[in-house]
Image (cartoon, helix red, strand yellow):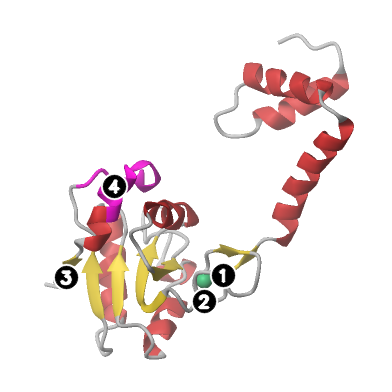
Amino acid sequence: VNISSKLLENAVEALASMPGIGKKTALRLALHLLQSDQEDVEAMSNALIDMRKNIKFCKTCHNISDDVICNVCASPKRDQTTVCVVESIREAMAIENTQHFNGSYHVLGGIISPIEGIGPNDLNIESLVSRVKDGKVKELIMALSPTIEGDTTIYYITKQLKDYEVNISTIARGVAFGGDLEYADELTLGRSIVSRIPYKND
Ligand SMILES: [Zn+2]
């Protein structure tokens, strides 16, 4: 792409740094912005800056939140005794979209992976154990990917909780899941949450 303006080129480069946006698409978007009202472009820029600057992570579940505690953890309509443990914010969003789950979440921020050098201390596991210790949690649903890393993480968490009275279950395996939980079709994912299976630690 041959661009005669350095200003335009900078904008294209910035847009092209986004995942899934190639140079051509970036140019199309930049030209679109160039033809838009300046106020609209400013509003868009401000929304991005605002999000980056001000979004918080819930103190309880580590999901994104506009407040110290997210609206799922703060809601009296949600079952705070059932906690769905997920790898990242994206999985929490996917499960939330199914509208089949009325409990709360715990976002680990990854899964244990010795190969990638991710250990239990890099994840939000201690705070999960604290939630169970506090006695408010009756069931943990492990909605982690059915991989060695996912299994290792479930095993590790289960071991940390062996002295506490908490039921641990996993979401049904064999559903479209893999590393792409967020793309799993919502009905299947919703059903797998409803028909979860007890975790056997052997
Ligand atoms: Zn929360």
Under mark 2, the amino acid is: Thr
Outermost residue toward the left? 202
Tell me the CA gap for discs 1 and 3.
28 Å
Mark 4 or mark 3, which is nearer to you?
Answer: 4
- Of the numbered discs 1 and 2, the one sitting upstream in the chain is 2
Whether the residues at callouts 1 and 2 have beta carbons within 8 Å, the answer is yes
For ligand 1, tell me if the residue under mark 1 lies within 8 Å: yes
Relative height, residue 135 to residue 82 (above, below)? below
Q: Quadrant of residue 53?
A: bottom right
Relative height, residue 162 to residue 191 (above, below)? below
Question: Residue shown at 63%/74% (left/top)?
Answer: 68
Whether the residues at callouts 3 and 2 have beta carbons within 8 Å, the answer is no
Under mark 4, the amino acid is: Leu
- Percent from the top left, x then y, of residue 101? 35, 63
Q: Which residues are magenta?
A: 175-190
Observer-nearest residue: 86 or 43? 43
- Residue bearing the label numbered 1: 70
- Of the numbered discs 4 and 3, the one sitting upstream in the chain is 4
- Residue bearing the label numbered 3: 198
Q: Secondary structure at mark 2?
A: loop
Mark 1 or mark 3, which is nearer to you?
Answer: 1
Q: Secondary structure at mark 3?
A: strand
Question: Residue shown at 77%/19% (left/top)?
Answer: 31
- Of the numbered discs 1 and 3, the one sitting upstream in the chain is 1
- Please tell me the numbered disc located at residue 60: 2
Tell me the CA gap for discs 1 and 2.
8 Å
Under mark 1, the amino acid is: Cys
- Please tell me the numbered disc located at residue 187: 4
Tell me the CA gap for discs 3 and 2.
24 Å
Q: Is residue 56 inside the magenta stretch?
A: no
Q: Quadrant of residue 135?
A: bottom left
